Image (spheres, rainbow, N blue to C red):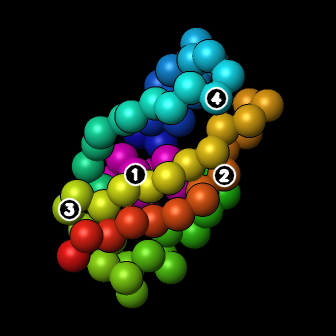
Amino acid sequence: MQKRVFDTISSFMAKAHPNEKVLAVSHAGACFNFLIAIGVDPQQFLKKRFGNCSILVIDYKNGKFKLEDLINPN
């Protein structure tokens, strides 16, 4: 699943124009797997309650993803 999620998001981003904002909607399981794939330990977010309607702000430059922020409305 992790590879499939990463490959799909990478494909979308490769087709996006530079500086274009892209919205992807998913469930926590896919988000956790994506974070692991980009080298982020999602366990740190369990303390913050990574819940429904959370927003991950991720930067994409030169084929690399970087987690910028986690917005948790709960």
Q: Earlier in the sequence, mark 4 or mark 3?
A: 4
Q: In 3D space, how far apart are the residues under numbered discs 1 and 4 (Cα atoms)?
A: 22 Å
Secondary element under disc 1, as helix, strand or loop, is: helix
Kindly identify which numbered label has been placed on residue 42. Answer: none
| Number of the front mark, 1 or 4 | 4
Q: Residue at x 56, y 26 (%)?
A: 20
Secondary element under disc 2, as helix, strand or loop, is: strand
Q: In 3D space, how far apart are the residues under numbered discs 2 and 1 (Cα atoms)?
A: 13 Å
Measuring from the top left, give residue 71's x and y in whole percent: 39, 66
Amino acid carrying label 2: it is Lys
| Number of the front mark, 2 or 1 | 2
> Farthest residue in the top direction?
15
Q: In 3D space, how far apart are the residues under numbered discs 2 and 3 (Cα atoms)?
A: 21 Å
Report the span colored magenta: 29-35
Q: Which residue is mark 2?
A: 66
Amino acid carrying label 1: it is Cys
Measuring from the top left, give residue 2's x and y in whole percent: 48, 42
Q: Which residue is mark 3?
A: 52
Q: In 3D space, how far apart are the residues under numbered discs 4 and 3 (Cα atoms)?
A: 27 Å
Q: Which residue is mark 4?
A: 19
Q: Which residue is mark 1?
A: 31
* Quadrant of the image occupied by residue 70: bottom left
